[in-house]
Image: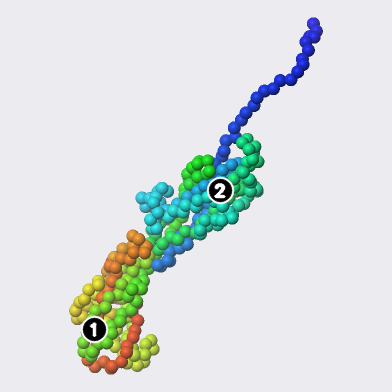
Amino acid sequence: MTDTGKLDGTGTSARSLAVIDVPSVLTAYNTAPIVLEAAVGDIVKISVDLSDPNGDHSPTNIRLVLWDDATAKTNQCTDDNNDCYIINLGTINPASPPANCTTNPGGTGETRSTPTAAGTKTAAGIDPYLTVSCNETVHFNANYSAAWNVNATVTDSSSEVTLFADSSDFASNALLAIGISSTTPSIAYGTVALGTDSVYKVIKAENQGNQILDYGLTGTLMCTDSPTCVGDTIARAQQHWEHGAATFVWSTGNALLETVTAGGAGVNGCVDSNAAVRAVYNVATEDVSTSWIIHIPANAKSGSYAGENTWTVATSTTCTAP
């Protein structure tokens, strides 16, 4: 049997597809240990590597969170300038990066333009590979911990929000540090008559680290030719002090020593202050203040005398010798 049918003409079949936008992908965090310094802290560099495989939507905001996971805080914490720091970068424009940040397109992709028409994949958005690096100041009162983390949340122009996994843990250092307040930089006893006591003077010291601390007090002779001290002198023990910011009787105060001795009490040159870590880095606690009185011996030579007193951090809250 022979098929004599004739096939003629053409037919069409409609086809359609939708290309699903793939949101940005975080490929790496780059962090380093936090190294805090007294009264300053550390400038911490946080870097994230992003990839936008099809490039259809540039990020409209990148939110970086740096926080101490050893506290009760999470990657959704509120910025407190202590154990939680947040950087909101906004739209990433490599030509005009956010303050304290840099951007670095990389990889093998090219910068691409806006699509010319719906369904026309001329490509769009950012370079498909992007590194964003930001500097964040971590203050000196930040928690001593081995569980600091970074987290990134990226929002793109299609309102797609991607919360990435946290970084690996990294550490901050323990910092024992004390400093003299700029409001009371020196003990100015003024003019004191022979055989009498000065009025009391207050020196405010500040906890400039992230550890509860005590401190020791020592000092030099007071001399008319300080610091060589080959001229007239007044013994260091003529200076007496008490913990706190109030007057006291010179005879009951603690004599200034050349070195702190064992014992952990005022007579050993130790101030058992248990000075707390600041809750807010730029608000000083004043529980490390000391009051000072000097008694001028009746046989002292007249003249202008100067010396130097030293505050030294003790290594425990029981005020053991430094």
User: Which of 286 and 98 lies nearest the eye of the viewer?
Assistant: 98
At a point 32% along the width and 88% down the height, the residue shown is 305
Instruction: Give above or below for 205 relative to 8.
Output: below
Query: Which quadrant of the rendered structure holds the C terminus?
Result: bottom left
**SS of the residue under disc 1:** loop
Query: Which quadrant of the rendered structure holds the N terminus?
Result: top right
Position of 252 with respect to 135 (left or right) is left
Instruction: Give above or below for 314 relative to 96.
Output: below
At a point 37% along the width and 67% down the height, the residue shown is 208
User: Which of 243 and 153 lies nearest the eye of the viewer?
Assistant: 153
Disc 1 versus disc 2: distance between alpha carbons? 66 Å
Q: Residues within 10 Å of mark 1 (few under 14, many from 20)?
A: some
Q: Amino acid at mark 1?
A: Ser
Pinpoint residue 76: horizontal percent, then vertical percent: 41, 48
The answer to whether residue 53 is seen in the rendering is: no
Instruction: Give above or below for 270 relative to 119.
Output: below
Name the residue carrying label 2. Answer: 50
At a point 38% along the width and 58% down the height, the residue shown is 82
Pinpoint residue 300: horizontal percent, then vertical percent: 26, 92
At a point 61% along the width and 48% down the height, the residue shown is 127
Image color mode: rainbow
Pinpoint residue 219: horizontal percent, then vertical percent: 32, 80
Name the residue carrying label 1. Answer: 198
Q: Quadrant of residue 266?
A: bottom left
User: Which of 101 and 273 lies nearest the eye of the viewer?
Assistant: 101
Position of 295 with respect to 209 (left or right) is left
What mark, if any, has residue 261 been given in the picture? none
Pinpoint residue 90: horizontal percent, then vertical percent: 50, 51
**SS of the residue under disc 2:** strand
User: Which of 95 and 140 lies nearest the eye of the viewer?
Assistant: 95
Q: Earlier in the sequence, mark 1 or mark 2?
A: 2
